[in-house]
Structures are given as structure tokens and as C-alpha cells.
Amino acid sequence: EVQLVESGGGLVQPGRSLRLSCAASGFTFDDYAMHWVRQAPGKGLEWVSGISWNSGSIGYADSVKGRFTISRDNAKNSLYLQMNSLRAEDTALYYCAKSAGGVIAPFDYWGQGTLVTVSS
Amino acid sequence: QSALTQPASVSGSPGQSITISCTGTSSDVGSYNLVSWYQQHPGKAPKLMIYEVSKRPSGVSNRFSGSKSGNTASLTISGLQAEDEADYYCCSYAGSSTFVFGTGTKVTVL
């Protein structure tokens, strides 16, 4: 059974940093691209970032480019999102999502999310 | 990377068919047959319903179908059921390893 468990969320002040993690199990992690998708409270889904199986292809939404860094550790079956210079508008539930194949494939499994709140 | 445009809400009676539109640009929906649709019930994670414009993952009801014409993709739900009441989001590949989601549509079963 595919499982994606996000962690690392919490309350953080504007301008500070936070690192999210996603622990994956139930599939061969290094065969698939992975993504982060966020959802602000009461709002829609926003794709944040994606990374190919070997970290060779990486993409970011314009809203986070230059501030967020996605990475993965295939030996640990883990996906990460380093978030710097956080803003109030980054407040959201952050989902880890598995790609159905390469980095352009759809997102076939999702975690339950970890909540990030940016506030002073 | 502007969000794809969806109607805020669509409603229908049980048994009816409804269609949700998803309008993008020639840089996303119009350029790639890589449109997917996600269903999200309140408090739950999204679920993949359609991928590559019109393909259904295993386990998804054949009441759900997708299509695309130009810069607009569509999701049709036939034989509407109470359990279909949820939020629906389209998503398109937008090049350079990036994606863009739609604004979301709330489906209400009357």
C-alpha cells in the first residue's frame, strides 16, 4: 500500500525558514517523480514544486522560485521542501504527491498534508 | 503561471450529466495532452480521476470522462450521484517541469 506521510509543518514567523519532509513507503521510491502541492485555508490547490526520480529535472511555481528548494534522498525514501523567506501567503496545507511516472505524469497518490502557518 | 479558469460551481440532479470546463492558454492546456482532473471531498486529500485528457485510472467509475478542444478541457460526470458532490480541479502540465491547477469547481447534487 502506498503511503506518504508529511511532517515538519508548524507556526513560523514571516521571513523565517522551515523544512518539510515526506516519508514514502509501499512503492519503489526512486522509480517515480515526486511533487509538493499546497492548499491555503478555504482555497484551491496550487502546485508548488516537482522533482524527477534522479533530481535531474526540477520545477518550481513562480510564487516560490528562489525561496523554496525541493530535494529527495532515495536511500531514505524521502522527499523534502526547504522553505526560506516565508510569507503570510505561504500559509497552507502542504501535500506530498507521488507521480504516476516521470515528472510530467499525473499525481496518483497524495499524503494527508502538513499545515504551515506563517504569522507573527 | 496563471491558474486555469473553472466555473466556481456546477449543480445537477441525481442521474443527470454535468460538464466542468477548464480554460487555459496555448502555453499549457493547448500545448500538451497532459490535463488531469482531481476530486476532493471536504477534509480529504485529492484523488486522481482523469489523466492525459481522457484516461481513467483503475477503479474510477466510467461515469467520469474527459475531453479537450484547443485551450479548454472538460470533465463530464454522467449519471450524477450523491457521492459525486465534491470539489473538482483540473491540472495541466505547463512545460519546464511545471504544472498549473485550475481554480476549482464545487459540484452540488441537488
Image (tube, rainbow, N blue to C red):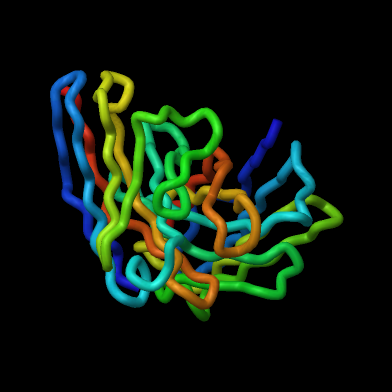
Query: Which sits in the foreground, A57 or A72?
Result: A57
Residue B6 percent across, percent down from the top left: 22, 53
Tell me if A37 is positioned left or right of A63 in this view: right
Query: Which sits in the foreground, B93 or A49?
Result: B93
Residue found 30% across the figure and 32% down from its top = B86
Counting every numbered tag in the picture gives 0
Tell me if A91 is positioned left or right of B72 in this view: right
Q: Is residue B101 above or below residue A41?
A: below
Residue found 39% across the figure and 64% down from its top = B100
Tell me if A67 is positioned left or right of B105 in this view: right
Residue found 55% across the figure and 42% down from its top = A110
Residue A106 percent across, percent down from the top left: 52, 53
Residue B97 is drawn in which quadrant?
A: bottom right
Residue A68 percent across, percent down from the top left: 55, 71
Q: Is residue A74 visible?
A: yes
Tell me if A110 is positioned left or right of A63 in this view: right
